[in-house]
């Protein structure tokens, strides 16, 4: 499938990154293959099913109980003894648990300093499934997938959160940390994803620099997950100033996409190209080949919008297997979702118009689409001043409902976590 071509069915999720992969393959659960573990029992031999020793509870009943538990108590059982560890990390149990808990979770930063600063994993009913502490203050969620949540904190240093264990580990220092110490905090852009060619996972970080008090070319660096050297590598700067209101790049078909800053460039150049710059994670080169929907948006507005009206009103996302541009038109309190349908010709199709007057009451700062559910509902992250909210929009009934509200802003970021919370490699 060519980049941008719409799929009739959703593509399968990508495999987790190196060293984060659940052991074994997912297979249908067979109750006869498992036995309830006994405390202090020896670990099961490889391939022997759910434990080596028969326990007190029938295996079917034990499975029924465990499948009803949240991930955190199950992970605590792993510390009881080797038999429980073997049982709860077996591929059959992992497959059964994933089948019972299939819905994605939202990773939302909760910053109520000094009383509480953490990342909550929230389901689409608004229930907090897990709370991950120790993230520190002034953080933002970069991404939440592949069995991990990535956050950026002080000096734009990146930490990796493990929902299965609650652990937090920081990546090594790079160029960005030294720049922040020298020049103070500057805007930063991030993107995390997988290369198309090798499946390698990379984290891209871009930071504005200053030379003698004046803005210089942004500094771009890459960190390869699983790299034995464990270091950041400096890359070529992006082809233009990036949009400071859309700082989380979207990785699609092996490339990270960003918006250009309307204020920092010649409008005639932008109109001539209408490009959305991208960084290929495999070749580590920038491109301006993709044409965005800006011209279509202005044409459809029929003179009611101009170039300046789009400033801080565009957001990127990946929805339904393709790139999506969200345009928040504050003049009519509506969000239009434009989907990329033809990469070569830069063709975009407007498939949703969402009335957000219910949330903004005529005023708002931004809207970020997060995902489209299997039922066709659109999940949105909405910012009003210093308040952030998650809403679910039903296009059939044209109604919306709020499921999450925090003090975090849209710049703090919200991630869609699709990983397995019981990943055994998280141990």
Image: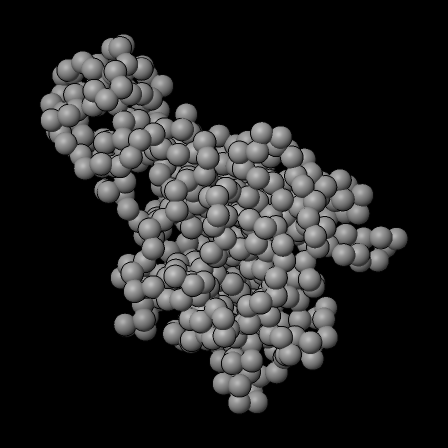
Q: Quadrant of the N terminus?
A: bottom left
Residue 320: x, y in percent?
A: 37, 62
State how the image is colored: one colour
The image quadrant of residue 321 is bottom left
- Is 139 or 315 nearer to us in this picture? 315
Residue occupying the point 27% across, 40% down: 98
Vertical placement of residue 176 versus 238, above or below: above
Question: Could you tell me how many numbered marks the image carries?
Answer: 0
Classify residue 391 as left or right of residue 9: right
The image quadrant of residue 155 is top right
Vertical placement of residue 232 versus 262, above or below: above
Residue 89: x, y in percent?
A: 30, 26
Vertical placement of residue 166 versus 2, above or below: above
Residue 327: x, y in percent?
A: 51, 72
The image quadrant of residue 77 is top left
Vertical placement of residue 29 versus 390, above or below: above
Q: Quadrant of the C terminus?
A: top left
Residue occupying the point 63% across, 58% down: 286
Residue extending farthest to the right is: 212
Residue 201: x, y in percent?
A: 51, 42
């Amino acid at each position: 499938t060519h980049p941008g071509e719409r799929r009739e069915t959703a593509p399968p999720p990508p495999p987790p990154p190196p060293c984060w992969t659940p052991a074994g393959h997912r297979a249908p659960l067979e109750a006869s293959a498992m036995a309830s573990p006994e405390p202090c029992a020896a670990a099961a031999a490889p391939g022997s099913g759910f434990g080596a020793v028969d326990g007190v509870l029938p295996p079917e009943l034990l499975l029924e109980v465990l499948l009803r538990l949240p991930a955190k108590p199950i992970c605590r059982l792993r510390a009881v003894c080797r038999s429980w560890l073997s049982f709860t990390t077996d591929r059959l149990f992992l497959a059964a648990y994933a089948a019972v808990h299939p819905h994605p979770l939202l990773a939302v930063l909760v910053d109520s300093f000094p009383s509480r600063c953490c990342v909550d994993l929230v389901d689409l009913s608004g229930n907090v499934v897990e709370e991950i502490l120790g993230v520190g203050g002034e953080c933002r969620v970069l991404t939440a997938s592949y069995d991990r949540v990535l956050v950026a904190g002080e000096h734009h240093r990146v930490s990796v959160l493990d929902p299965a264990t609650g652990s937090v580990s920081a990546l090594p220092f790079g160029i960005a940390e030294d720049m922040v110490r020298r020049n103070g905090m500057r805007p930063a852009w991030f993107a995390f994803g997988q290369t198309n060619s090798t499946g390698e996972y990379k984290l891209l970080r871009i930071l504005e620099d200053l030379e003698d008090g004046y803005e210089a070319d942004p500094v771009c660096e890459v960190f390869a997950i699983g790299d034995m050297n464990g270091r950041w590598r400096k890359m070529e700067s992006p082809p233009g100033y990036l949009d400071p209101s859309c700082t989380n790049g979207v990785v699609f078909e092996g490339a990270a996409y960003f918006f250009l800053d309307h204020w920092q460039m010649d409008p005639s150049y932008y109109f001539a190209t209408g490009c959305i710059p991208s960084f290929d994670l495999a070749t580590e080169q920038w491109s301006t080949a993709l044409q965005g929907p800006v011209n279509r948006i202005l044409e459809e507005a029929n003179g009611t919008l101009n170039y300046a009206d789009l400033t801080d009103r565009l957001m990127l996302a990946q929805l339904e297997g393709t790139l999506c541009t969200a345009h928040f038109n504050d003049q009519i309190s509506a969000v239009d979702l434009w989907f990329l349908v033809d990469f070569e010709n830069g063709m975009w199709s407007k498939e949703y118009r969402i009335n957000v007057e219910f949330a903004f009451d005529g005023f708002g700062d931004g809207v970020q689409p997060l995902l489209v559910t299997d039922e066709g509902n659109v999940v949105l992250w909405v910012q009003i001043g210093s308040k952030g909210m998650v809403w679910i929009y039903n296009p059939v009934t044209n109604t919306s409902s709020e499921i999450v509200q925090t003090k975090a802003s849209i710049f703090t970021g919200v991630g869609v976590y699709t990983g397995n919370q019981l990943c055994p490699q998280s141990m």
